[in-house]
Structures are given as structure tokens and as C-alpha cells.
Amino acid sequence: MTPEEYLARVRALLPVLRERAARAEQLRRLPDETFADFQETGLFRALQPKRYGGYELDPGTFYQAVIEVGAVCGSSGWILGVLGVHNWHLAILPLQAQDDVWGKDDSIQLSTSLAPTGTVERVSGGYRIKGRWSFSSGCDHCQWAVLGGAAPPVAPGEPADPRVFLLPRRDYRINDNWHVMGLCATGSKDIVVDDAFVPEYRTHSYHDAFALNHPGAAVNHAPLYRLPFGQIFTYGIVSPAIGAAQGALTCFREQAMRRINVRDGSRTVEDPFIQYRLAEAAAEIDAARERMLANFAEMMRLARVGEEIPLSMRARCRWDSGKAIERSVRAIDLLFEASGGHGIFLDNPIQRAWRDVHAMRAHAGNNPERASFIFGRSEFGLPLQDIRF
């Protein structure tokens, strides 16, 4: 699978994804046909290991695909980005965990909810976990879930051990509470675990992930699996926002070309205010996309030659992701405000992009202030207080 072939498959689906966007919102989850299309065309396999039928493409190619899908349907872009990243995430877990999920069917997908909201107990051979985890996007279509939790310290006086825990569908239930104003079609419902045992090999420490100690890299040798978890995960939820902004820009341009000022009969495109808004939005979107692609190109270059990705670079890339969501929100705000009364109608894609991008910004991982904190401390040589980059 070449990048060109992969993107061609993505672009062939865009018209039907655009047509399904309104119905997807009504369903409050991705339509079964869309999920089937993603599966049949292999879109989720971009970052999946070749040993399990994946393509091992560069992240830049995958995120470009997410941008293009997000431009026609923000929720569809979000699901492609999030679930596609989960296939990378599973690839860095121990081999036995990968075989548990993909050993008999390598098309199986995982959802996640990484906030440590449940309780974790250390037991012989692993952990027992229980609780409720929110915002598990695409969970209706998935057979496994990766949940975040803080395990008790190994020894008294040590800090808690933040980890992720991989559970099969039989160990949890889905609570359908997804009634929201944006990202309506992502089906990001709650996962409820009454009491489940998770063996040690189906967990991964955040500290190990930060140190690039990926057990799965022992069998998945591609440079792709030597990248930091924080960088891969973050852009799974940032690239859909860039896509939503790009889609809003396209719609705004097309709609402005047809609009006439009812007061004086002039064409809307002759209005300097409209021209300024379009220009500013385009600049914000281009900056967000190009910084993302440049950062991943450099990280992949370093990974291919076996060089370390410096923490200073990782911190800067994390800041760039924070700015990307900020730029995407600003771009859509500019366009929505300039769309006039027609922009608020539910059949106008610009208002859906506006709702979706603000829902994306609300995700804890899309917090520009936290990203600036990571970068600022790095630049001043201060001790690290966050390992999620």
C-alpha cells in the first residue's frame, strides 16, 4: 500500500461520507455503512503492523487522510483518527496482547477512554479494575477497550503507576449517554466495568511509553513504532479539527460566490470584510497542517536512522498540536461569524463544523494552555511535570 493508493481510497469515499453526515448526527454514532466502508477499504490499517494486515504508513499520510475525511464530516474524521491511532497503540503493547485481539481477526477495532477515572487493584498476575470511563468514541463498533487507570505504587512511598488496561467486550458494558451538541456522530459513550481481571501483559505503563520502552517494538520493527505515544495520540484528535476547518473554508468560499447583498445588490465576494475572513482562515489552516506534516516528517527521519527524538523537539511538537487546535477553532469562528443568518441553518455544513471543532477543543488532550506549559518548561530547562508527550 503506497501513500498515493491509500489517499485515493480515502478520496473515493468522500462524496458518500458527505451525504451521510446529517444522518450520522441523528444516529449519534457512525452509520454501519460508513464503518463497513472504512473496514473494507482498509482505512483503519494505515498505522497497523504488517504482521496483522496493516500498511505501516507514515503518520503524515494517515493524518492527511483524517483531515480530508474531517473536511466532509467531522465525526467521521474523528472516528478514523481515533480508531486508526488505536491500531498503532496496540502495536506497541506486548505481542500476547496483540494476538489476543488480532490473532483470529485482524480487522477488530478498539475504543479507548484514557482518563484514570476507575479504580485499580494490584493482584497476582495483573490487576483488577472497576468503574466508569467516559468519551469512548466509536465503542459501538469495537470489541475491545483500552482504559486508563492509576495502579497503586509497587512499594510504599512511591508514586502511583499510571497505566492503560486492555479489556475484551465481555468485561464491560456501554452506557448510551451520548446526547451532545458537537461530534454528535462519534458515539462517544461511557464504558462501565463492574469488576474485571486484566493480566499484566495487557497493560502498559505511561512511564514506559514516555521513555519509548514499547514492548511491541520487539516484533514490530518499523520506525513508526519508535515514535512517542503522546505525539501519535494527540494528532489523532487534532487532525480532524484541521479537517473540519478546511471543510468550512471550502463551503464558505462556495457559498460566498453565490451570495448577493440584499441591500445594494453587490456580490458578497467583493466585500473586503469577507475577503479578510477567508484569507485569515486559510492562513490558520495552512499553518496548522504544514507544522504537523513537517514535525512528523522530521520525527520519522530520526526514527529511520535510529536517532533519538529529543525531548525539546517533542515538547515543541506538543505545543504545535495545541496551536493547531487553537488555529482550527479560530478559522471556523471567523467563517461562521461571516456566514450571516444562513450559517445557522442545520443544513449548512459550516454550523456543523463550528459545533464539531468546539467539541474537539473541549477534549482534555486538545488544551493549548497545557501544551504551552510543557513547551515553556522545556525551553526554560525546568523539570518535567507531564509525561504525555
Image: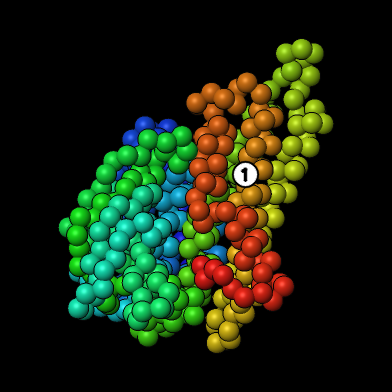
Q: Residue at x 72, y 73 (%)?
A: 380
Q: Image quarter for residue 332? A: top right
Q: Badge 1 is on which residue?
A: 329
Task: Provide residue 243's location: percent of width, then percent of height.
Answer: 56, 48
Q: Which residue is farthest front? A: 157
Judge from the rendering whether residue 287 lies leftward or rightward of residue 309; answer left or right. right
Could you tell me which secondary element the residue under label 1 belongs to?
Answer: helix
Q: Is residue 198 above or below residue 302?
A: above
Mark 1 is on which residue type? Val
Task: Provide residue 330's location: percent of width, then percent of height.
Answer: 67, 43
Q: Image quarter for residue 251? A: top right
Q: Is residue 350 above or below residue 307?
A: above
Q: Nearer the viewer, residue 196 or 213?
A: 196
Q: Residue at x 27, y 77 (%)?
A: 201
Q: Is residue 42 visible?
A: no
Which quarter of the rendered picture does the C terminus lie within?
bottom right
Judge from the rendering whether residue 58 lies leftward or rightward of residue 188; answer left or right. right
Q: Nearer the viewer, residue 81 or 133?
A: 133
Task: Provide residue 364's location: percent of width, then percent of height.
Answer: 50, 53
